Amino acid sequence: MNHPHKLVRLNLHLRPEHLNRLTTLACALGKKKCRDTRLAEAMELALTAGLAWDDADLLELAKPDREEPQWLALGPIVRTR
């Protein structure tokens, strides 16, 4: 995807434990930088670390929908242009 803007706004559904972990990371990042940090900075840091993995390794982490029914609970994804 090629976006003219440096930042993109997203609506996300996150698990509570992931949100807690990101919040903890944002607080630690704020202490390290000696300033307030946004949750998006922690998400960017986590994505940078995670996306450093090979795609095949990341895909091995994916569980079947039957093991993680919370994604099915959101309903089908309908993409329109």
Image (cartoon, rainbow, N blue to C red):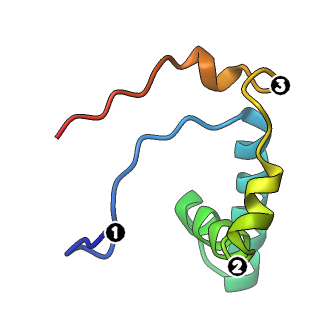
Mark-to-mark CA distance, 1 and 3: 33 Å
Residue 39 as seen in the image, left or right of residue 32: left
Amino acid type for the residue under numbered disc 1:
Leu
Amino acid type for the residue under numbered disc 3:
Glu
Q: Residues within 10 Å of mark 3 (few under 14, many from 20)?
A: few
Residue occupied by mark 2: 52
N-terminal of the pair, mark 2 or mark 3, is 2
The answer to whether mark 1 and mark 3 are in CB contact below 8 A is no
N-terminal of the pair, mark 1 or mark 3, is 1
Amino acid type for the residue under numbered disc 2:
Ala
Helix, strand or loop at label 2? It is loop
Helix, strand or loop at label 3? It is loop
Residue lying at 72% horizontally and 19% vertically, measured from the top left = 69
Residue occupied by mark 3: 67
Helix, strand or loop at label 1? It is loop
Mark-to-mark CA distance, 2 and 3: 26 Å
Residue lying at 76% horizontally and 45% vertically, measured from the top left = 62
Report x, y in % for residue 28: 78, 70
N-terminal of the pair, mark 2 or mark 1, is 1
The answer to whether mark 2 and mark 3 are in CB contact below 8 A is no
- Residue 7: which disc? 1
Residue lying at 61% horizontally and 62% vertically, measured from the top left = 43
Choose top left, top right, bottom left or bottom right for residue 20. Answer: top right
Q: Nearer the viewer, residue 76 or 42?
A: 76
Report x, y in % for residue 8: 33, 61
Report x, y in % for residue 58: 75, 61
